[in-house]
């Protein structure tokens, strides 16, 4: 088997991180998100079958998206003065399509996570999203969120139906059905630059 010379490997790595740095500086968040997903082979995916939860280090989030035909990406980050700053170097906590309108995924205990992308539209440029943080071992229903584009920016309108969420969990993840509780969230703005101009489709 032919081996790649070590100097070639080093050059390829340098070129990758140079391209990554340029993409971030130019505000190309969508391209950056794709690169992060490529790095994060363990990014959260829709769970098929029983969900295994490490009660000492993880939590489970559940929320509903309307309309529900779009793929959703959830990233972690930090909340600072009412604004959310998405992490740049961690894999997505969830990426995939809703199941019966619901997203269910895992996050690290205590970390802040937020809805980053719906149907290719990224929360950015002063747009609005929701962020939440769950304690270790909690299975938390965050809420129902209606997705809209207002002035070219993502906006989520919240409502709640814990009983319906409980029915979803009981149907698809009965191992968690007796653990679902109401969780809180924050409505936050996202100051990161958009990979498109506000008003574009």
Image (cartoon, rainbow, N blue to C red):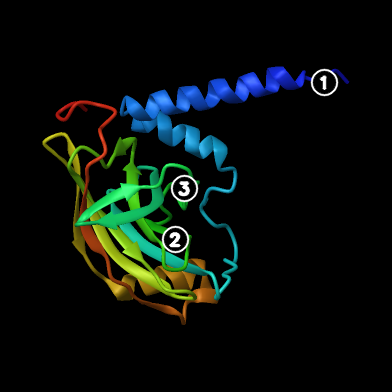
The quarter in which the C terminus is drawn is top left
Proximity of marks 3 and 2: CB atoms separated by less than 8 Å: no
Disc 1 is placed on an element classified as: loop
**Residue that numbered label 2 is attached to:** 104
- Position of residue 129 relative to residue 119, above or below, is below
Q: Residue at x 40, y 50 (%)?
A: 75
The mark that comes first in sequence, 1 or 3, is: 1
Indicate which disc, 1 or 2, sits on the residue closer to the N terminus.
1
Nearest the eye: 183 or 29: 29
Residue matched to label 3? 92
Q: Residue furthest left?
A: 151
Along the line of sight, the residue nearer the viewer: 125 or 7 = 7
Q: From this viewpoint, is residue 68 visible? A: no
3 or 2: mark nearer the eye: 3
Q: Residue at x 25, y 33 (%)?
A: 193
* Helix, strand or loop at mark 3: loop
How far apart are the alpha carbons under marks 1 and 3? 32 Å
Q: Position of residue 188 (x, y in %)?
A: 21, 54
Location of the N terminus (image quadrant): top right
Residue denoted by label 1: 3
Q: Position of residue 187 (x, y in %)?
A: 20, 58
Q: Residues within 10 Å of mark 2 (few under 14, many from 20)?
A: many
């Amino acid at each position: 088997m032919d081996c790649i010379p070590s100097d070639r490997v080093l050059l390829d790595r340098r070129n990758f991180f140079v391209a990554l740095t340029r993409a971030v500086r130019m505000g190309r968040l969508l391209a950056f998100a794709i690169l992060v997903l490529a790095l994060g082979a363990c990014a959260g995916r829709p769970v098929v079958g029983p969900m295994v939860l490490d009660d000492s280090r993880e939590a489970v989030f559940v929320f509903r998206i309307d309309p529900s035909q779009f793929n959703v990406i959830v990233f972690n980050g930090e909340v600072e003065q009412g604004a959310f700053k998405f992490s740049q170097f961690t894999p997505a906590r969830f990426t995939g399509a809703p199941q019966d309108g619901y997203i269910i995924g895992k996050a690290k205990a205590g970390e802040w996570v937020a809805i980053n992308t719906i149907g290719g539209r990224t929360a950015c440029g002063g747009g609005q999203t929701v962020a939440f943080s769950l304690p270790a071992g909690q299975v938390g229903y965050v809420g129902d969120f209606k997705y809209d584009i207002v002035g070219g920016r993502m906006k989520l309108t919240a409502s709640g139906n814990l009983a319906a969420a409980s029915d979803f969990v009981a149907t698809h993840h009965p191992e968690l059905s007796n653990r679902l509780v109401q969780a809180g969230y924050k409505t936050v703005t996202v100051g990161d630059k958009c990979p498109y101009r506000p008003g574009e489709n």
